[in-house]
Image (tube, grey):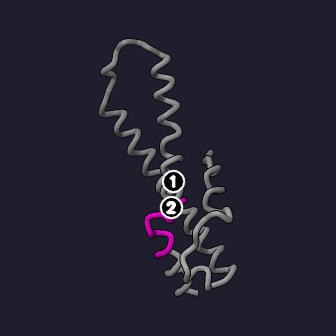
Amino acid sequence: MSDISGLASVTGAGTALPADVRKAGKDGEDTYRAALGFERTLLEQLTKTMTKDMAGEGGDDSGDGDSGASAATSAYNDMLPSTLADAVTGAGGLGLAHDLWLKMRSGS
């Protein structure tokens, strides 16, 4: 099951919208928020993959058997992709959402 709890960060009123999106009205804003939600999900999935790959490269070098540190590290690693995706999209995203929005608007 997919966790989409972070979508609140791109659907809320606090999200800064580009001027051309605001001028497009409510439908344009809704379309942009959907595109920003897609961008956020994509960022989260890419970050999860990156985190998983980095954990695989590190191997089990610690070998000290400290399960407390492993649990803390695991919890941090689980939160990192979502937090990073929220931060990037909250700051306006990478630009993918706006490009998608422009393409969807020109296609209609």
Label placed on residue 87:
1
Q: Is residue 11 magenta?
A: no
Q: Is residue 96 magenta?
A: yes
Indicate the position of residue 48 as horizontal and vertical percent values: 45, 44
Q: Residue at x 55, y 66 (%)?
A: 36
Indicate the position of residue 39 as horizontal and vertical percent values: 51, 62
Mark 1: give few (<14), some (14-19) or many (20+) Cα within 10 Å.
Answer: some
Q: Quadrant of the N terminus?
A: top right
In the image, residue 72 above or below residue 16: above
The magenta-colored residue range is 90-99
Residue type, numbered disc 1 = Ala
In the image, residue 38 above or below residue 67: below
Contact flag, marks 2 and 1 (Cβ < 8 Å):
yes
Quarter of image, res 50: top left
Marks 2/1: CA–CA distance: 6 Å
Q: Residue at x 53, y 39 (%)?
A: 79
Count up the numbered dots. 2
Label placed on residue 34:
none
Q: Quadrant of the C terminus?
A: bottom right
Indicate the position of residue 95 as horizontal and vertical percent values: 44, 69
Between 57 and 36, the residue placed more toward the observer is 36
Residue type, numbered disc 2 = Ala
Indicate the position of residue 62 as horizontal and vertical percent values: 33, 18
Mark 2: give few (<14), some (14-19) or many (20+) Cα within 10 Å.
Answer: few
Q: Which residue is mark 2?
A: 91
Element carrying mark 2: loop
